[in-house]
Amino acid sequence: MALQPNPFGFMSERATNRLTRRARSVQRYWQPLLVPDSPSDLIQDAPTDPAIEQLTTLTIENLSASHAQGSWSLVVAGLDSLMAPGEENEGSRPTEYAYRAARSVVESAYGRLLSERKTSMFNIPLPIVITDDRGGVKLAWHQGTKHVRVNFGAAPELRAYLYFESSAEHDIEALQPSNLSKRLNWLLTP
Amino acid sequence: MLPRALLPIDFLLRVLLRRGELNDPRSAFLLRENEKDSGLSVNFDYTTEECRAQPCFSKTYGVRSLTVQSVLELELEVQPDEPHHANITGIPHTDDDPRRAEYLAGQLERVSTLVSEGLVKNDR
């Protein structure tokens, strides 16, 4: 696993490690609740872990910036958790091809979205990250009645696609960073 | 023994075979690799416990329930082939038509309910 930048750069290494361990234990079930809707929610729902309690002393600006990075780091953690050895992933681990494709495309899409929106990304809902029965990787984002789903095939010859759906339309697009970035932006548009 | 004819009010059970099908319910209604030719596999006239205890499953993560009527309203068919088993036909595999496969999976998710949840392992 590649080293990731510290998403909580304003915290001590020890506190960061504790927070990361906590996030990884919770993300096994990969609930969107991991990412609150706004920094104020994060403050109101502050857990009792002393490492996380430090967040309550931070400014809104710090929270926004850190949450943007934290959001991506949680997506990466979700992808990495699929590769982890253990009984939980037995029979449903993704192929190396699908994992690498998902990391590459989603990271690039988030990067584009961040630069294009010129804001933090704390409004992007955390995706559900799962595998299919052939070792492909799927990510699904939901916001209200809108859905964006991406499917990375287990092998190059298997189909990869981006699917989007709202109450008014549904279709597929080529699974490219530019399209995913565009659709995540669409997801956030009221 | 021939399967009985299904009525619109009958309940169908879809067993969740991967944790992902529990976390992302829509994916429970995408055809699996071994369902490409037969259709979406469902059970009927079983309790959820009986359904999950079938020896063909080594472990299950849950069960979703839906009525035959709700499937028919999506212009799909339910074809029983065994006393407790049927296939929902008319759903394409994502390899062939991902647009329709994803849409129908979403519709089936909406009309279904999670009726059993949690890992169950069967001794075989």
Image (tube, coloured by chain):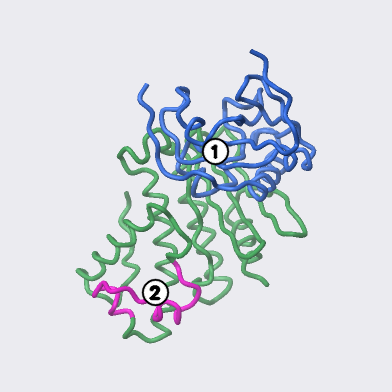
Query: Circle 2: is it few (<14), some (14-19), or many (20+) Cα within 10 Å?
Result: some
Q: Chain of mark 2?
A: A
Q: Chain of mark 1?
A: A
Q: Is residue A103 left or right of residue A160?
A: left
Q: Which colour denotes chain B?
A: blue
The stretch drawn in magenta includes residue A121: no
Quadrant of the image occupied by residue A157:
top right
Discs 1 and 2 lie in a common subunit: yes
Residue B88, located in which quarter of the rendered image?
top right
Is residue A165 shown left or right of residue A108?
right
Drawing shade for chain A: green
Q: Residue at x 28, y 74 (%)?
A: A48
Magenta residue span = A35-55
- Amino acid bearing label 2: Ser
Q: Tell me what residue is drawn at x 19 percent, y 69 percent.
A: A14
Which residue does the numbered mark 2 point to in the structure image? A66
Decide: is A175 above or below A181: above
Q: Secondary structure at mark 2?
A: helix
Q: In x, y percent, where is residue B22?
A: 50, 46
Asked if A112 appears above or below A128 in the picture, the reply is below
The secondary element bearing badge 1 is classed as loop
| Mark 1, residue position | A153
Q: Residues within 10 Å of mark 1 (few under 14, many from 20)?
A: many
Residue B34, image x and y in percent?
57, 25
- State the residue in front, B69 or A110: B69
Q: Is residue A44 magenta?
A: yes
Question: CA separation, marks 1 and 2?
Answer: 32 Å
What's under tag 1, amino acid-wise? Gly
Q: Which mark is residue B11?
A: none
Q: Of A145 and A63, which appears nearest the observer?
A: A145
Q: Quadrant of the C terminus of chain A?
A: bottom right
